[in-house]
Image: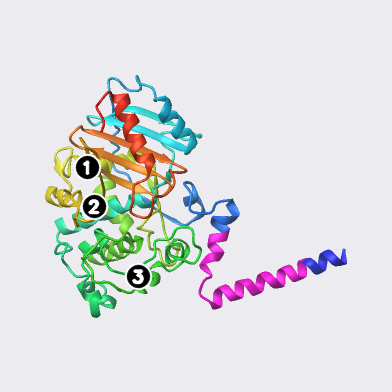
Amino acid sequence: MKRLKKFFKWLLILSILVIAVLYLTDTDYLIKAVRTIYLKGHTTAYLEDYQQFDNDTLRTGTPQPWALHRNYNTSTETEKLTQWNNDLGTVAFLIFKNDSIWFEKYYDGYDKASKSNSFSMVKSMVSAMLGKAIMEGHIKGLDQPVSDFYPEFSEGMAKQMTVGDLSSMASGTNWDEAYYSPFSITTRAYFDDDLRKVILGLKVVNPPGKSFKYASGDTELLAMVLEKATGKRLVEYLSEVFWEPMGAEHEALWQVDSKESDMVKAFCCLASNARDFARFGKLYKDHGRWNGKQLLDSSFIAKSVTPRFPESPQYGYGWWLYKTEKHSFFMMRGHLGQYVIVEPNDNIMIVRLGHRKSPDAGVGKFTEDIRVYLEEAYRMLEIEFP
């Protein structure tokens, strides 16, 4: 018994010392990481982790349910698609044809109302809000300097950085996009309770507007700009200009850094469902029109789904771009394989949500699972691919 008491005594002392060191070295965000992720058995963020964090709520307006195609679910998954969905832990797989749901299947206890983490798919929504803010006159255009809103970026190369650079991932900052390192700024941003402070500590180390470098911090800084420009919290603005008018059927939850700071994690972490995520694919497919109303400028959308830099054809402004021999897709894309993929010429959208994706090919690269989902969906539709 004495040995046991001594053990717990020294364990307590060690724990106190570790916590003290974390605070002294400004890495106390790791305490939240351990509590919310690592002690849950995960090595990175996961689909249901929004339940472990503070969240703000996106409001709904009048629900506009999706139409079901006359051939709804008359087709079955291909054998290959079933295998990939099982192996990678798919929770939702939907195919939309001509603005109606043609195929829909859920797995692992999920259903059409189940929420899951968007991860970086929400970056496309933040970019859409930039387009809306320009449309409403809150922001002058893609070339407006970030320093107009945050003088912290008014010196040296930073003064050249524009809001368009943030949307197109061309800020030139020293952001390190590393998901599995507990000491990367990406991990700090995910768990820190003062996200604004983290972002304002970024340094511009390369000329902005010259090349693509995927950086979640760009989207977070863009979100901070949008809040200053519109005078509204981002969750309120997204509800007002898109979530309500597009008839989302369910409220969504958007993670915030803390109740005190109340800054949304704009680079990730909006919890919603497959059907409501798909609405942004349709909005962009239809050049910004929704039920006859122009919610977003069509020229902004055209620019968004066109590569900004010829040497980086995979990215536009907030949207990923994927080409095959016969098809041109644009997509919302998130960690662990969250996708809303659109082929406007075929009037087809594919939504996949799940626990894993095929092994990374590197930041900014496309993984093999994307092509498999497209190939098998087109095979089910009996449309030639690629």
* Quadrant (top left, top right, bottom left, bottom right) of the C terminus: top left
**Type of colouring:** rainbow
Q: Name the residue under label 1.
A: 283
Which of pointers 3 and 1 indicates the residue nearer the eye?
3
Circle 2 residue: 128
Q: Label 3 amino acid?
A: Asn
Find the distance from the CA under tag 3 to the CA under tag 1. 33 Å
Viewer-proximal residue among 178 and 274: 178
Q: Could one spot residue 98 in this view of the protein?
A: yes
Instruction: Name the residue furthest right.
Output: 1
Outermost residue toward the bottom?
155
Q: Which of marks 1 and 2 is nearer the N terminus?
A: 2
Mark 1: which secondary structure? Answer: helix
Residue at x 41% of width, y 30% of height:
81
Verify CB contact (< 8 Å) between mark 1 and mark 2: yes
Q: Residue furthest left?
A: 299
Can the viewer see residue 248 in this picture? no
Q: Which residue is identified by label 3?
A: 174
Q: Horizontal and vertical percent for residue 324? A: 24, 39
Q: What stretch is highlighted in magenta?
A: 8-34
Q: Is residue 11 part of the magenta span, yes or no?
A: yes
